[in-house]
Image (tube, helix red, strand yellow):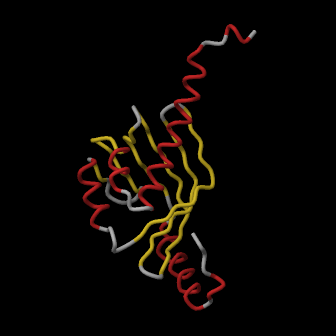
Amino acid sequence: MTDNVPETTTTTVTAAADNAEIVQKFLFAMAEEDFDTVESLAAPDLLWQNVGLPSLRGRARIMNLLRRGQGRMGFAVKFHRIAQEGSTVLTERTDALIFGPVRLRFWVCGTFEVHNGQIELWRDYFDFFDIMVKAPLRAALAALIPSKRVSF
């Protein structure tokens, strides 16, 4: 029975798994400030959308912005779920923006489009209330109560 299964089924599943790995490698490299890897995984016409904020287009422009933050602020990511179908990768994760001892943690759902091993679309959805109110309150609480600090 399995002799009739087209070979493209295996290729599609492998490509999709590779796309999820590319997205993880991209975000982990950003967390490590490995901007050469980030740049290599970004398509020249990368579109970065944080829904509700202005979009950025172009690898050179986005890399310039990311590199300007190097040493001034940090980034961390924790994946909760990742799913893929074809070129589309969906992530459910917690991101952290790090300013010295202060970590602003917030949930993010992301959509990535990966073609030929490079990310062409990076779209993140998040709750502004979570970022602007809850994350700073959690950070302040962690500063006052050491047991509330998170390792990630």
Residue closest to the far right: 1
Q: Which sits in the foreground, 122 or 147?
A: 147
Q: Is residue 4 above or below residue 42?
A: above
Figure quadrant of residue 11: top right
Q: Which sits in the foreground, 25 or 126?
A: 25
Q: Is residue 115 left or right of residue 3?
A: left
Figure quadrant of residue 29: bottom left
Q: Residue at x 39, y 43 (%)?
A: 121
Please state, as top left, top right, bottom left or bottom right, where the C terminus lies in the image.
bottom right
- Counting from the top left corner in percent of width and height, residue 53 is at 36, 60
Q: Is residue 94 above or below residue 114?
A: below
- Counting from the top left corner in percent of width and height, residue 147 is at 66, 84
Q: Which sits in the foreground, 27 or 108?
A: 27
Q: Residue at x 60, y 75 (%)?
A: 150
Q: Residue at x 53, y 70 (%)?
A: 105
Please state, as top left, top right, bottom left or bottom right, where the N terminus lies in the image.
top right
Residue closest to the far bottom: 144
- Counting from the top left corner in percent of width and height, residue 50 is at 40, 56
- Counting from the top left corner in percent of width and height, residue 9 is at 60, 20
